Image (tube, rainbow, N blue to C red):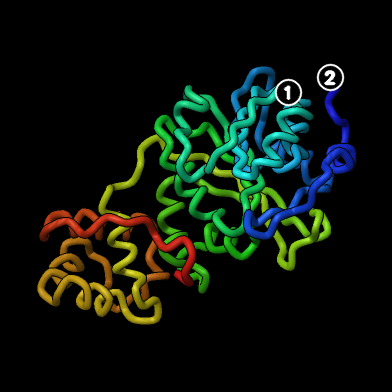
């Protein structure tokens, strides 16, 4: 069976619509698809995981690049349709938040190339960054607002716990902005394509807990946030040991400063309750 040559050809073959409960907006721009495939640096036989292939627009482009594609689709109708349309890909009907990624796509050279659903995009991203061994790279489309948070440098008003948590796990760059008209149906917001290179070693297990504490009230000083959660004595000891200014707002700190604070946290008392950074809230 020959591969569809364009996004329009794939979408014409899809008999259904986009479902709001799955956050579906199907990519329809061949130009944006070409930018995504180029950013992924694919070649014959390169293993690729795609999350949420929908009717298979991006999947078809990955196959045309001769990648070895495994895709996870939660929508049963999209799963059945795309598997029939694109038998060269392996489509799995499942939830990307719970499926065994290592079993699906083993090996260290794998990429993840996906248009992530808006409603759970950051949760999926954090899970993808937990893969061991890490992906060689990830090329992901996200809501622009989320992408700006992930890219936000120290001092940026959009910088929060999620920014630091992801930057501790990967180097990130913007590939391109994507207007609503690049999708069918068009969303109400803009999107962005990001490329991430995961670091070979994950951050300290205590970092995420510290970020939740440190960004609990982003407009307060770091000292006040730490004292509220850890007590005055331990908070002051951590600041002294790390050399980080307690008067600073949490968004001003760079990653090395958070890493020094994490080391001081471990040295000064019991572990914090573990938890993922806030992927949905304002921080």
Q: Report if the CB atoms under discs 2 and 1 are less than 8 Å apart.
A: yes
Residue identifier under label 2: 1
Q: Position of residue 95 (x, y in %)?
A: 53, 43
| Of 15 and 108, the residue lying toward us | 15
Badge 1 crowding class, 10 Å Cα cut-off, few under 14, some 14 to 19, many 20 or more, is: few
Identify the image quadrant of the N terminus: top right
Report the residue at 54% width, 58% height from top.
Answer: 151
Q: Residue at 74% x, 63% y: name it.
A: 187
Residue for point 50% across, 33% down: 135
Residue 278, how many percent across, how many down?
42, 63
At horizontal 41% and vertical 41% (from top left) the residue drawn is 130
Vertical comparison of 242 with 250: above or below: above
In this image, 53 relative to 276: left or right? Answer: right
In 3D space, how far apart are the residues under numbered discs 2 and 1 (Cα atoms)?
8 Å
User: Which quadrant of the view contains residue 216?
Assistant: bottom left
Horizontal and vertical percent for residue 145? 61, 65
């Amino acid at each position: 069976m020959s591969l569809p040559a364009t996004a329009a050809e794939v979408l014409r073959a899809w008999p259904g619509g986009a479902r709001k409960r799955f956050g579906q907006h199907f990519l329809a721009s061949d130009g944006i698809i070409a930018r995504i495939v180029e950013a992924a640096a694919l070649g014959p036989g390169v293993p690729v995981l795609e999350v949420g292939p929908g009717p298979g627009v991006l999947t078809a482009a990955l196959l045309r690049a001769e990648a070895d594609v495994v895709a996870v689709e939660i929508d049963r109708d999209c799963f059945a349709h795309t598997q029939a349309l694109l038998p060269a890909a392996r489509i799995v009907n499942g939830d990307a938040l719970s499926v065994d990624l290592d079993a699906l796509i083993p090996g260290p050279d794998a990429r993840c190339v996906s248009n992530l659903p808006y409603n759970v995009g950051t949760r999926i991203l954090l899970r993808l960054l937990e893969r061991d061994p890490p992906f060689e790279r990830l090329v992901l489309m996200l809501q622009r607002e989320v992408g700006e948070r992930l890219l936000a440098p120290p001092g940026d008003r959009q910088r929060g716990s999620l920014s630091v948590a992801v930057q501790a796990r990967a180097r990130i760059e913007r590939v391109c902005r994507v207007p609503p008209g690049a999708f069918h149906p068009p969303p109400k917001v803009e999107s962005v394509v990001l490329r991430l290179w995961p670091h070979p070693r994950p951050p300290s297990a205590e970092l995420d807990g510290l970020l939740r504490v440190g960004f609990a009230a982003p407009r307060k000083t770091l000292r006040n946030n730490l004292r509220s959660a850890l007590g005055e004595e331990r908070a002051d000891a951590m600041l002294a040991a790390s050399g980080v200014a307690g008067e600073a707002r949490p968004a001003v700190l760079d990653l090395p400063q958070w890493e020094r604070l994490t080391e001081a946290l471990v040295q000064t008392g019991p572990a914090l309750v573990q938890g993922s950074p806030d992927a949905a809230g304002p921080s």
